Image (cartoon, rainbow, N blue to C red):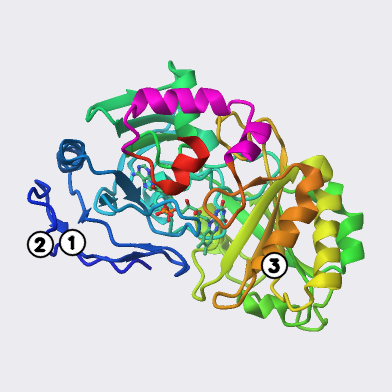
Amino acid sequence: MTTMNLPRNTSPAHAATPPVPFGTDVTWTNWGGNQSATPAFTVRPRTEQEALDAVRFAIREGLPVRAVGSGHSSSPLVQTGGVLMDMSALSAITGTDRDRRRARALAGTTINAFGDPLWEQGLALGNQGDIDKQQIAGALSTSTHGSGKNLGSFSSNLRWVKLINGHGEIVEIGEGQLRELRAAQVALGTLGIFLEVELAVEDRYYLQEQITYPTWEETASTWDADIDTNRHYSFLWCPEDGSCELLDLPGSPDQNMRNRSYTKRYNVAHIRDEQEISGVEGARLDRSYRIYPDGFNTQFHELEYFVRSEDGLAAVEAVQELIRTRHSDQKYPVEVRWVKADEGYMSQFQGRDTTVITLTTEPGTDYWQFFRDADAVLQEFEPRAHWGKIHFMTRSRLERLYPELDTFIQVRREFDPRGIFLNDHTRALVG
Ligand SMILES: Cc1cc2nc3c(=O)[nH]c(=O)nc-3n(C[C@H](O)[C@H](O)[C@H](O)COP(=O)(O)OP(=O)(O)OC[C@H]3O[C@@H](n4cnc5c(N)ncnc54)[C@H](O)[C@@H]3O)c2cc1C
């Protein structure tokens, strides 16, 4: 995780210091260990007012500001030499509305922390991804997603946000301001510091899990049916026997997993009482939020590309061919998921029902040629990339791939005319 220890008020390089607890020379490192920074000041606001004071201090001192959530992004989104805002203390569910199916939470609330409080109100998040450790504002900022043809990303469910803009003001964006809301849905931390958000959620539901281990030919032959008939369908294709174990997934007990898939299906189950809950591996039945995975113990680095769902099968086969013919040293499973189209200007799913292809590699190995080759092989499918994972996006690529890029940049400049919320990475992309 991060290596921040706060507060640690030692002699700062700047004469002025933030009017909130801060640390200096505090090195921040992300979960994957491939990104780090030593900001001038690291602050951990405990209240909205402290967050506002920290941003106003940065504006006065001419320092840039970035927020950090749980540090699970492996792209250089968080780095700053100015003020780093650790948002973890701003964590709570602040309200639920059963009739409107809405939940409000402070920006630093982890996805995991939505589970019990929402359930008690008869509600649940509509979907989750492979882990639940991210803070909600971090997940929203990169359009974090799970899988399911009819299920959108977290960002697609953002309905309201309260944030601190680059003028040093607290402002709100709601459904009456669609232009701004669509910019806020996926903002890479560049509109300002999110303080509180409102999400569309669902009536609570139980999920039944089904894990199977088909051959690749079987996986491909039931492609459409599996996507269409399951609420949540995803799979991990194994290039080798032993691939599953690299991600701590139980391989088939009686099959060599080479060229097989570890498939996951989750469908809504109706139960009479919670006595029916079952923890049988591969066939669990439980409250939705307890079925979705919680975390990974071993580090890895990922590249994740998004193609139109009609191109999904061809794109996966192109990646398989690449691994077989040019990168047979790559043993990790290739994960494949589906996400419904949405309207966030910078969302990877903007206007496209999407197949997601995730390539996982081992930290400390030289995976760059593999990632570059995958990027090249997938170009014919006009892929977008996960903002929070390793990618090769440039401004000119964004101009081709995101029809609303200019609108996003206009909104960003209105919220932050001096660009205090930009770092080198985001300036190059959306500055
Ligand atoms: C093990 C693992 C599993 C993963 N599984 C999935 C998955 O299943 N699906 C998927 O889509 N992604 C997945 N990811 C990627 C992850 O969801 C994203 O990188 C996500 O953005 C991380 O959230 P975070 O809270 O760690 O944010 P960080 O990585 O800390 O920050 C991400 C961005 O959010 C901004 N930000 C954070 N808080 C605020 C705030 N309060 N205001 C404004 N901006 C803010 C930061 O400035 C930064 O730009 C996974 C990553 C890992 C390491």
Q: Which residues are magenta?
A: 395-420
Q: Which amino acid does the dot numbered 1 rest on? A: Thr
How far is the residue under mark 2 from the one under mark 3? 43 Å
Tag 1: Cα neighbours inside 10 Å, few (<14), some, or many (≥20)? many
Tag 3: Cα neighbours inside 10 Å, few (<14), some, or many (≥20)? few
Residue 411 is drawn in which quadrant? top left
- Mark sitting on residue 254: none
How far is the residue under mark 3 from the one under mark 1? 37 Å
Q: Are marks 1 and 2 in contact (CB under 8 Å)?
A: yes
Q: Residue, x 59% and y 25% (percent of image)?
A: 404
- Asked whether residue 269 is drawn in magenta, I would say no
Residue where numbered disc 2 is placed: 9
Q: Is residue 200 visible?
A: no
Locate residue 372, reporting x and y percent.
Answer: 69, 60
Q: Earlier in the sequence, mark 1 or mark 2?
A: 2
Q: Are marks 2 and 3 in contact (CB under 8 Å)?
A: no
Is residue 24 shown left or right of residue 122? left
Q: Are marks 3 and 1 in contact (CB under 8 Å)?
A: no
The image quadrant where one finds the N terminus is: bottom left
Tag 2: Cα neighbours inside 10 Å, few (<14), some, or many (≥20)? some
- Mark sitting on residue 369: 3
Is residue 32 shown left or right of residue 23? right
Q: Residue, x 24% and y 43% (percent of image)?
A: 63
- 284 or 362, nearer to the observer: 362
Q: Is residue 418 visible?
A: yes
Residue lying farthest to the top in this orientation: 176
